[in-house]
Image: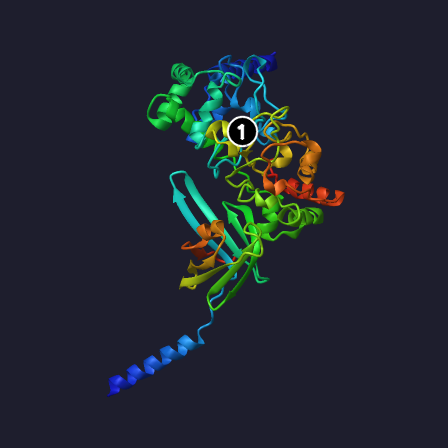
Amino acid sequence: MKKMLIGSVLALAAGLYAFTEAPHTLQGRWENVTSTKDGTYRFLAVFRADDTYDGFMNGKAFLTGKYHFQNDTLTLSDHICQEGYTGTYFVQFVTPDSLVFRLINDTCSIRREGTDGVTFKRLPVKP
Amino acid sequence: MKKTGVILLIGVGWMIAAFTHETPLPGSTAALGRKLFFDPILSRTYTISCASCHQPAHAFADTSAVSTGIFNRKGKRNTPSAMNTRLQVSFFWDGRASTLEEQALIPIANPDEMGLPVDEAVARLQKNKYYRTAFKQLFHENPSRENLAKALAGFERTLETNDTPFDDWRLHENEAAVSAAAKRGFALFNGKAECIKCHFGPDFNNVEFRSIGLFDGKQLNDSGRAAITHRATDLGKFKIGSLRNIAQTAPYMHNGMFKTLAEVIDYYNDPDKVVPHSINRDTLLQKPLSLTNREKQDLEAFLRTLSGKEM
C-alpha cells in the first residue's frame, strides 16, 4: 500500500513536470559537423530572436531567410528557394541541446537535401 | 683594425651559412604543394609556374583576358581563381575535371600553358634531391603522378576565404562591417537583380553550368560545356564562377571580355545591348533587369564585400 502511494505520488510529480516543462527553443547557434577524407565540413545555422536565420559552411555565409517555430514545427523560407516557397520540418529534440530535422513538407530540393535528417548540436553562448 | 677583422669574420661566417643553408623540407602535403605551385620546375622551359597565372595578389587569378604560357603562347580562356575550390565539384570553365587532383595536372601538360608532359614533370622531381626527399618524407615513396596531384590539390584546398566583411556582417552581426550601399546591394542580389538564382552556396556559384549569352557562333564561338558533353543543349554553357574575391579577379567571364564589375553588371542588366544575337542564352536572362544607376552601384558595393582580409 505504502509502495503504491509512493508510486502514485511520483507519477503525479512526473506528470506535473511534463506539463510545466518549458517549450523547446530554437533561438541560438546550431552546428552540424561532418568529416570526410577531404576534411571537416562545419554547417552552422543561426536562428535569431527576430525570426531570421543564416547558414554558414566552414565560416562562409551563404544562406539568409525567415523562420517560424511553434510546437516543435519549423517553417523556413529563404532567398535560394525563393521566399514564397516554404519548407516545413518537425524538429525532434534529442536533448535540449541537440536536434534532428524531420521533413514534413518542402518542395525545394536543395533545402530538403541539406535539412531532412540532419543532426545539429547547440553551440554554447559566448560570454 | 680590430673592428675590420670582426666585421670580416662576421661576413665570412654569414656567407658560409648562406651557402651551406638548405631549404627546410615541407612539413605537410599542403606545404609541399605550395612549393610546387610556385616552382617553374613544372614547366617545359623552367619559366612558368602555376603562380605565374594564378597570382596571389589577384586572388590566385590573372589580370589578363587570357594568360601567357611558355614561348609567350596565349591560353584560350580566362584564368579562374584557384581559391575557394574545396567545395567545388567540377573544375575549369567547361567542367572537364571532377576532382581537384585531376585538375591540378592538366595545366602542366597543356602545350599553351606549362607544356610539360606529366611523366616528364615527375621524372624531373625524382631527379631533384630536395623533392625526392620531401615526397619520401610525406608520402613514403618517390614523386609520382598521383602524389604530385595530391600535393598541389592539398595546397589549393588551403586557399579558402571565409573572413570577408560580408561573413563578418552575417556571422557576428557586425552591422558596421559593410556599408548601407552594400546592404542594399545584397537585397538586390537576392531580389530584383536575380543574381541568387545562379550564384548561391558558400562560394556563390552553385554547381551548374549556364549559358549567359556569350555565344553567338561568330565572334563569340567558344561552345563551352558542349565540347565536353557533346550535347547541343550545353552550347555556350560555362561553369558558374565563384563570387568570393570577385573584386580582385578582373577581367571577367570565360573569355575575360569584361574589364570591370560595372561592365559585368551592365551586361546582366541588358545582355542584348552587348551581345545582340546570342544563341542558347538562359531564359533567366530574357528580360532586361532595368536596374537604376544607383542600384548598379549598390550591387557592386555588395560584391566588393566578398573579398577576404588578405586581399
Amino acid type indicated by mark 1: Gly
Give the farthest residue toward the right.
Answer: B293
Residue B111 is left or right of residue B192, and the answer is: left
* Residue pictured at 49% horizontal, 62% vertical: A74
Mark 1, chain letter?
B
Q: Quadrant of residue A10?
A: bottom left
Q: How is the image coloured?
A: rainbow
Q: How far from the left and from the top, in percent, is residue B298?
A: 70, 44
Q: Residue B300 or B24: which is nearer the viewer?
A: B300
Residue B52 is left or right of residue B90, and the answer is: right
The residue that disc 1 covers is B224
* Residue pictured at 52% horizontal, 20% vertical: B49
Q: Is residue B221 visible?
A: yes
Q: How far from the left and from the top, in percent, is residue B162?
A: 55, 42
* Residue pictured at 44% horizontal, 45% vertical: A41
Residue B301 is left or right of residue B155, and the answer is: right
Q: How far from the left and from the top, in percent, is residue B158?
A: 49, 35
Q: Residue B83 or B189: which is nearer the viewer?
A: B189
